Amino acid sequence: MKTITLTGHDIREAVTMHEAIDAVRRGFVDLAGGEFEMPTRTVLRDGQFLVMSAHHRSSASAMIKTLSLNFQRTPAIAGTVVWSETGRLDHLVADAGAVTALRTGAAVGVATDLLAAPEAGRLTLIGAGGQAPDQVRAVHAVRPLRQLTVVDADPQRARALLETLAPELAGVELLTATDAESAVQEAEIVCCATNATSPLFPASALPAQVHVNAIGAYRPTMRELPDELLADSTVVIDELDAVLEESGEIIHALEAGAISKDALTELGTALTAPAAEYGKRTVFKTVGVAMQDWAIAQLLAGKFLH
Ligand SMILES: NC(=O)c1ccc[n+]([C@@H]2O[C@H](COP(=O)([O-])OP(=O)(O)OC[C@H]3O[C@@H](n4cnc5c(N)ncnc54)[C@H](O)[C@@H]3O)[C@@H](O)[C@H]2O)c1
């Protein structure tokens, strides 16, 4: 029996963002095709601990992730991913912080590739914490950036993020801003990656054509997007049951009557449908599902265990 243990560094060295995006894209297609057994995640202590699991039927492999979350701590998210396969004794144990950031970025990469205008290259990112670098890397992988503006409630975090990313973003204009409302006014793509509990900007601040990704809210009490934006956009989500249970913005907009459930399209369905004409404003809302972690763990197992 072999147990391989991978640190965040090992994971980063082994998996490129392009590979992560391809793996997570295949995962979303398989999710839409009924290939996964994936219970709604277990939430303990009002979201301070999460337990997630997914079984991929045709490969007979499964992933279980445990996370602890604390936004007074850096990193805010820590934990363990365990991958195994029926019929073999080998296991893979991986740092969940790196897997989570990579797979959350990758989902945003898949959605941005599908929904953003082909020439979009001006990104505004709100929230410069642990998830932020992979949000930028993922968008840059599918829509090479011309300009990146970073906004954070803590301006020092915004500056530090740009310093971290600068070597990877040669030729991209790098800016910080303090006011989210004005920073989204000329954006072609917006990424929201905060732990905010109320909308980060009014819908009226956005240009007529824009793609918005929102990864931050994962509890009904959390929100990054206003109802008016959801009402006025093509809204794609990671998984219906998960967002109905956990996405504060979707729950709020449904309760306010701003949107109906029929207006929500799962990413896997959108990827497999014939090329669609989307509205000028598109939103991708993800709370994160276990399939994404499985997709990265399966990729790692292929590299380290076979
Ligand atoms: N959707 C998913 O799959 C997924 C995956 C991982 C994390 N998350 C969620 O994403 C969020 C961010 O995670 P993280 O690990 O980067 O957290 P973090 O604590 O490292 O960073 C959050 C950042 O947001 C900033 N912020 C908070 N409110 C703000 C506001 N109103 N305006 C501007 N900046 C603001 C904070 O200053 C901080 O820098 C969390 O809520 C986390 O649970 C979602």
Image (cartoon, helix red, strand yellow):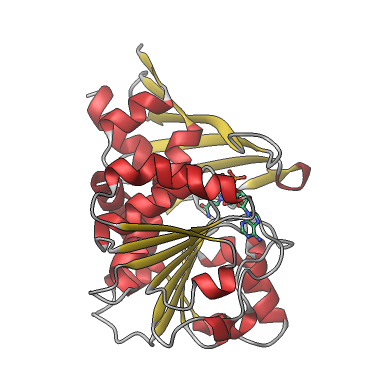
Q: Residue at x 59, y 67 (%)?
A: 179
**Which residue is more in the foreground, 136 or 237?**
136
Image-based side of 256 in relation to 103, left or right: right
Image-based side of 129 in relation to 45, left or right: left
Q: Is residue 232 visible?
A: yes
**Which residue is more in the foreground, 68 or 116?**
116
Q: Residue at x 70, y 75 (%)?
A: 252
Within the image, what quadrant is residue 118 found in?
Answer: bottom left
Q: Is residue 30 visible?
A: no
Image-based side of 298 in relation to 77, left or right: left
Above or below, 84 relative to 105: above
Looking at the figure, which quarter contains the N terminus?
A: top left
Q: Residue at x 37, y 74 (%)?
A: 188
Q: Give the residue furthest to the right.
A: 45
Q: Give the residue furthest to the top.
A: 1
Looking at the figure, which quarter contains the C terminus?
A: top left
**Which residue is more in the foreground, 232 or 202?**
202
The location of residue 226, given as percent across then percent down, is 63, 77
Q: How many marks?
A: 0
The location of residue 223, given as percent across then percent down, is 66, 66
Within the image, what quadrant is residue 268 found in?
Answer: bottom left
The location of residue 2, given as percent across then percent down, is 35, 13
The location of residue 164, given as percent across then percent down, is 40, 40
Above or below, 204 relative to 44: below
